[in-house]
Amino acid sequence: MSTYDPTGASWVRLDRLLALGDPLTQDVWGCGPVGRGTVLTELDRPSTCEHDDPVPCRACEARRIAWFVRHGVDPRDPHPIAVDIGVPSPSSSPPWPVLDGNHRVAALTVLGAQLVPVVLYGDIDAAIAWLTSEDSFI
Protein backbone atom coordinates (compact mmCIF):
# COMPACT_ATOMS: atom_id res chain seq x y z
CA MET A 1 0.00 0.00 0.00
CA SER A 2 1.22 3.55 -0.60
CA THR A 3 2.69 5.45 2.32
CA TYR A 4 0.93 8.30 4.15
CA ASP A 5 2.26 11.77 3.46
CA PRO A 6 1.18 14.86 5.44
CA THR A 7 0.41 16.71 2.18
CA GLY A 8 -2.15 14.02 1.37
CA ALA A 9 0.06 12.71 -1.43
CA SER A 10 0.68 9.09 -2.30
CA TRP A 11 4.12 8.08 -3.51
CA VAL A 12 3.83 6.26 -6.83
CA ARG A 13 6.28 5.03 -9.41
CA LEU A 14 7.10 7.71 -11.95
CA ASP A 15 6.90 5.27 -14.85
CA ARG A 16 3.28 4.49 -13.86
CA LEU A 17 2.46 8.21 -13.87
CA LEU A 18 4.16 8.66 -17.25
CA ALA A 19 1.98 5.86 -18.63
CA LEU A 20 -1.00 8.17 -17.99
CA GLY A 21 0.73 11.12 -19.66
CA ASP A 22 4.33 12.17 -20.30
CA PRO A 23 4.83 15.96 -20.42
CA LEU A 24 8.15 15.57 -22.26
CA THR A 25 6.73 13.62 -25.20
CA GLN A 26 3.26 15.12 -25.51
CA ASP A 27 2.10 18.65 -26.33
CA VAL A 28 1.07 19.72 -22.82
CA TRP A 29 1.65 23.46 -23.21
CA GLY A 30 0.37 23.97 -26.76
CA CYS A 31 3.80 24.68 -28.24
CA GLY A 32 4.77 21.17 -29.30
CA PRO A 33 6.53 18.53 -27.20
CA VAL A 34 9.45 20.02 -25.29
CA GLY A 35 11.53 16.84 -25.17
CA ARG A 36 14.35 15.70 -22.93
CA GLY A 37 16.98 16.94 -25.39
CA THR A 38 15.58 20.46 -25.34
CA VAL A 39 15.72 20.49 -21.54
CA LEU A 40 19.30 19.16 -21.52
CA THR A 41 20.30 21.85 -24.04
CA GLU A 42 18.67 24.47 -21.81
CA LEU A 43 20.69 23.17 -18.86
CA ASP A 44 23.91 23.33 -20.88
CA ARG A 45 23.25 26.62 -22.69
CA PRO A 46 20.49 28.64 -21.01
CA SER A 47 18.38 30.57 -23.47
CA THR A 48 16.71 33.93 -23.28
CA CYS A 49 13.23 34.14 -24.60
CA GLU A 50 12.10 37.59 -25.59
CA HIS A 51 8.72 37.63 -27.24
CA ASP A 52 5.52 39.59 -26.78
CA ASP A 53 3.26 36.56 -27.06
CA PRO A 54 1.55 35.87 -23.72
CA VAL A 55 1.58 32.15 -24.56
CA PRO A 56 4.91 30.58 -23.56
CA CYS A 57 7.03 28.98 -26.26
CA ARG A 58 9.01 25.71 -26.10
CA ALA A 59 12.10 27.60 -24.89
CA CYS A 60 10.05 29.13 -22.04
CA GLU A 61 8.73 25.72 -21.02
CA ALA A 62 12.19 24.11 -21.26
CA ARG A 63 13.57 26.89 -19.05
CA ARG A 64 10.89 26.21 -16.41
CA ILE A 65 11.65 22.48 -16.44
CA ALA A 66 15.41 23.15 -16.30
CA TRP A 67 14.88 25.32 -13.21
CA PHE A 68 13.39 22.32 -11.37
CA VAL A 69 16.18 20.07 -12.64
CA ARG A 70 18.80 22.50 -11.27
CA HIS A 71 17.04 23.26 -7.98
CA GLY A 72 15.21 20.00 -7.35
CA VAL A 73 11.58 19.20 -6.72
CA ASP A 74 10.56 19.62 -3.10
CA PRO A 75 8.37 16.65 -2.10
CA ARG A 76 6.92 18.83 0.68
CA ASP A 77 5.67 21.45 -1.78
CA PRO A 78 2.36 22.76 -0.39
CA HIS A 79 0.98 22.43 -3.94
CA PRO A 80 1.62 18.75 -4.70
CA ILE A 81 1.51 17.24 -8.16
CA ALA A 82 -2.21 16.74 -8.85
CA VAL A 83 -3.43 13.93 -11.08
CA ASP A 84 -6.98 13.38 -12.33
CA ILE A 85 -7.39 9.63 -12.61
CA GLY A 86 -10.74 10.17 -14.32
CA VAL A 87 -13.92 8.17 -13.99
CA PRO A 88 -14.79 4.93 -15.75
CA SER A 89 -16.71 6.60 -18.59
CA PRO A 90 -15.49 7.52 -22.08
CA SER A 91 -17.23 10.90 -21.87
CA SER A 92 -15.67 11.79 -18.50
CA SER A 93 -11.99 11.13 -19.11
CA PRO A 94 -9.75 14.13 -18.45
CA PRO A 95 -8.08 15.57 -21.57
CA TRP A 96 -4.77 15.57 -19.67
CA PRO A 97 -4.20 13.73 -16.37
CA VAL A 98 -1.76 16.10 -14.63
CA LEU A 99 -3.79 19.03 -13.30
CA ASP A 100 -0.85 20.72 -11.59
CA GLY A 101 2.85 19.88 -11.72
CA ASN A 102 3.69 19.14 -15.36
CA HIS A 103 7.04 20.98 -15.14
CA ARG A 104 7.91 19.06 -11.97
CA VAL A 105 6.95 15.71 -13.54
CA ALA A 106 9.11 16.56 -16.57
CA ALA A 107 12.04 17.54 -14.31
CA LEU A 108 11.70 14.36 -12.25
CA THR A 109 11.79 12.40 -15.50
CA VAL A 110 15.02 14.13 -16.59
CA LEU A 111 16.48 13.52 -13.11
CA GLY A 112 15.65 9.82 -13.32
CA ALA A 113 13.42 9.78 -10.23
CA GLN A 114 11.80 6.48 -9.33
CA LEU A 115 8.98 7.77 -7.13
CA VAL A 116 6.81 10.88 -7.21
CA PRO A 117 4.33 12.26 -4.68
CA VAL A 118 0.90 12.82 -6.21
CA VAL A 119 -2.54 13.79 -4.98
CA LEU A 120 -5.24 11.96 -6.91
CA TYR A 121 -8.58 13.32 -8.07
CA GLY A 122 -11.42 11.62 -9.91
CA ASP A 123 -13.22 8.37 -9.27
CA ILE A 124 -12.19 6.96 -5.91
CA ASP A 125 -12.50 3.34 -7.08
CA ALA A 126 -10.34 4.04 -10.14
CA ALA A 127 -7.78 5.80 -7.93
CA ILE A 128 -7.69 2.90 -5.46
CA ALA A 129 -7.35 0.39 -8.29
CA TRP A 130 -4.49 2.41 -9.82
CA LEU A 131 -2.76 2.88 -6.46
CA THR A 132 -3.11 -0.74 -5.41
CA SER A 133 -2.01 -2.39 -8.63
CA GLU A 134 1.17 -4.29 -7.91
CA ASP A 135 3.53 -2.09 -9.87
CA SER A 136 2.20 1.40 -9.07
CA PHE A 137 3.76 2.03 -5.67
CA ILE A 138 6.36 0.84 -3.22
Image (cartoon, grey):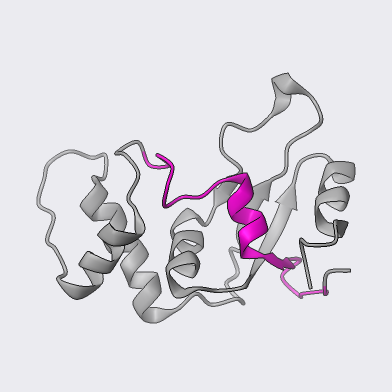
- The residue lying at 36 percent from left, 63 percent from top is 65
Point out residue 103 in the picture as x, y percentages from the top left corner.
43, 58
- The residue lying at 29 percent from left, 60 percent from top is 37
The residues colored magenta run: 3-29
Q: Is residue 3 left or right of residue 27?
A: right
Quadrant where the C terminus sits is bottom right
| Vertical comparison of 92 with 4: above or below | above
| Vertical comparison of 102 with 2: above or below | above
Q: Is residue 132 left or right of residue 48?
A: right
Point out residue 116 in the picture as x, y percentages from the top left corner.
63, 68
- Is 27 a magenta residue? yes
- The residue lying at 71 percent from left, 70 percent from top is 7
Q: Is residue 113 left or right of residue 129?
A: left
| Vertical comparison of 28 with 64: above or below | above
- The residue lying at 12 percent from left, 61 percent from top is 48
Q: Is residue 12 left or right of residue 81?
A: right
